[in-house]
Image (cartoon, helix red, strand yellow):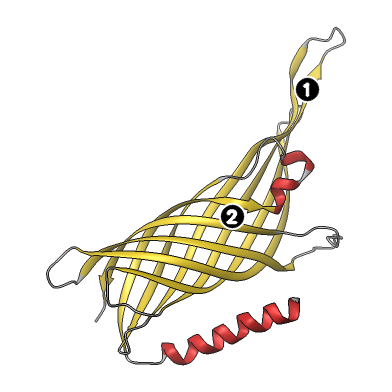
Amino acid sequence: MKHIRKNWFVNLFILIIPISLLPAQTVMTLGLEGGGFVQHTDNDLFFTKNNNLDLTWGFNTGIIHQQTNGSSLYYQLGHFNGTAKGIIRSTVTDEFGNVLGEANLSNLSYTVVPIEATWIPKHDSYLVWGVGVSMVLNSRAIILHNYFSNVDITDRLFSVGVGPHLAILWYQSLSQSEGASVLFSTKLKWVPTIWYDKSGRDVSDYHQSYIHISATFSLCFSMK
């Protein structure tokens, strides 16, 4: 099953490459993104049951190649963060049972850099849809704060995920010449991890995957 899944991703990239070589009109996009994890395997860990990863915020930039055959290719590079705060807490007391403070306060945070290619079959209307592939660089950090030393200890795990996505896009021109426009888009992607930076650790019993949905507002500028 994994072999079939990886071959599907490779075949889609092979399909996208020759399409991108067709004569094209180029549009550059700059956008702000808000979203959330619909499902995340790290939300199933014992210490995140009460404080899950949820909302994410970030930005992205991209280039849309509008082909002469009516289709488009949308390449994007983004960055967003997600956090689950206060996942591990322990209370410090004195010999009389008086609470002095919290010895450890741990946060789980994600920094995500998606590199994405979306194929839009028809670019002849203001409302279009597209499908594509997301290659995602994930940096997961568990930050443990020690009450006594006032020092943060950070455990990081870097990973790479590859998965499909579905996008719906809506355009609105800002000028009669259509040199500038705004773009509203919604994207749903599933990202299973294919590689971990183990750094000498045993991660054989750990699996990371998630479903993420996002909405983006972008400004578009024609580069023809």
Quick check: 176 left or right of 181?
left
Q: Which residue shows up at 51% across the image and 71% down it? A: 116
Q: Residues within 10 Å of mark 1 (few under 14, many from 20)?
A: few
**Residue 27, located in which quarter of the rendered image?**
bottom left
Quick check: 161 left or right of 224?
right
**Residue 89, located in which quarter of the rendered image?**
top right
**Image quarter of the C terminus:** bottom left
Q: Is disc 2 placed on a helix, strand or loop?
A: strand
Q: Residues within 10 Å of mark 2 (few under 14, many from 20)?
A: some
Q: Nearer the viewer, residue 144 or 86?
A: 86
In the rendered structure, which amino acid carries the disc numbered 1? Thr
Mark nearer the N terminus (2 vs 1): 1
Q: Is residue 108 above or below residue 194?
A: above
Percent x, y of residue 28:
33, 72
Q: Which residue is mark 1?
A: 91
Q: Which residue shows up at 35% across the image and 63% down it? A: 30
Percent x, y of residue 161:
65, 67
Tell whether label 1 touches label 2 (CB within 8 Å): no
Q: Which mark is residue 129?
A: none
Q: Which residue is mark 2?
A: 111
Quick check: 67 left or right of 38?
left
Q: Could you give the CA–CA distance between mark 2 and mark 1, rounded to whole angstroms?
A: 29 Å
**Residue 169, located in which quarter of the rendered image?**
bottom left
In the rendered structure, which amino acid carries the disc numbered 2? Thr
Q: Is disc 1 placed on a helix, strand or loop?
A: strand
